[in-house]
Amino acid sequence: MTPHTILAVTDFSTRGDHALARAAHLCAEHGAALRLAYFAAPGHTPPPDAACRLGHHAQQLGQRHGIRAGAANRLAFGVEHLLAETRCADLVVWGTEPDRRLRSLFVGQPVEGLLRACRRPVLVVRRPASRPYASLLVAVDFSPASRALVDLGFALNTTAEVELFHAISTANEGKLRYADVSEKAILAYRHECRRYAQGRMFWLTDSYDARRNRVLSDIGHGDPARQTVVQQQHSRAELIVVGKHPASAMSDFIAGSVAKRVLRHSRTDVLVVPHDREAATSASAAIRLAAEPATTRRVRAGAPRPPRRPNPAAMPG
């Protein structure tokens, strides 16, 4: 999927600047339209000139990169206020500082709430963006959605080196030990899981024969989220691509999805792709962008109106 419309979310922090730069680079690379939105985390007051600053950023990015860029005319004071904007975007680029208040331990970070409510790929940017991604690490679980993750990674940059990574979870081994299963049977189970993973990985990489020289693969053993982060640190991939199954806030709080834990522990950029994602129509996004007044227009800041064979070691994303 090649993005036609990109929504960049910023809070004017350093991470926000990185996100705007990355979004602009992606728009220039794919000929996409860019839309900027300001997000104020709960409990934070935006600067009085936030709307004007957002418009100036859009104008500067449009001129610098030769892209169509516009700014949302309302500030977002919560994830729910961003949802209307995300529906007109194929990709959301997120760049805000994490919420360090105690309540975030219980309600989660704002980006986690966005991932639950938004059915669009969300690119969480943490590093400066001066060039396209040169290397990607795609975490696969061999579900039907894994192929789509790889395709999306290639769509972001057709020349990037892509490494497919799968971690064989040890959770089921723990259950076997709890049931007093012999160590020999556990080793046999581990061998079968690895044999299955190798076969599926071969099938997945072989389907990209035209790009074989830029597709690597590796298999780890352990917690999928932790092993993905460790593998990224080892390979120095510039972006992690990970899928996310639909989940409620309660299930995320109790168990925590793989995508959520990768986001929390990784220090590099992470692209989270919902398995039930939807694509925005380029027509609706273009119409909305064209209808937007000039980006230098001054807008008063204020609160928005209310408005097949299963993998034996697979873990839910």
Image (spheres, rainbow, N blue to C red):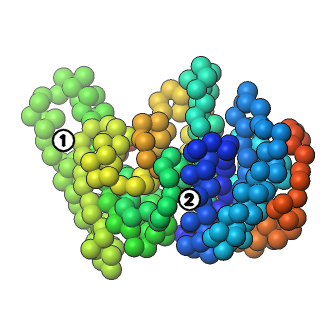
Which of the numbered marks, if any, corresponds to residue 233? none
Query: Farthest residue toward the left?
Result: 184
Please provide percent x and percent y for residue 88.
73, 61
Image-quadrant location for residue 214 = bottom left
Please provide percent x and percent y for residue 186.
16, 35
Residue occupying image coordinates x 18% and y 41%: 189
Q: Is residue 316 visible?
A: no
Residue occupying image coordinates x 88% and y 64%: 293
Q: As drawn, is 164 to the left or to the right of 76?
A: left
Q: As drawn, is 225 to the left or to the right of 22?
A: left
Q: Quadrant of the N terminus?
A: bottom right
Query: Farthest residue toward the bottom?
Result: 210
Q: Nearer the viewer, residue 263 or 12?
A: 12
Q: As drawn, is 15 to the left or to the right of 298?
A: left
Image-quadrant location for residue 57 = bottom right
The vertical placement of 94 against 161, above or below, is: above
Residue occupying image coordinates x 81% and y 66%: 288
As helix, strand or loop, the secondary structure at mark 1 comes to: helix
Q: Quadrant of the C terminus?
A: top left
Please provide percent x and percent y for residue 185.
13, 35
Comes first in the chain, label 1 or label 2: 2
Q: Identify residue type, mark 1.
A: Tyr
Quick one: label 2, few (<14), some, or many (20+) residues within 10 Å? many
Q: Nearer the viewer, residue 148 or 98?
A: 98
Query: Farthest residue toward the top?
Result: 102
Please provide percent x and percent y for residue 93.
60, 54
Which of the numbered marks, if any, corresponds to residue 22? 2
Q: Which residue is mark 1?
A: 189
CA–CA distance in space, label 1 to label 2: 44 Å
Q: Is residue 300 visible?
A: yes
Tell me the mark number nearer the camera, choosing from 1 and 2: 2
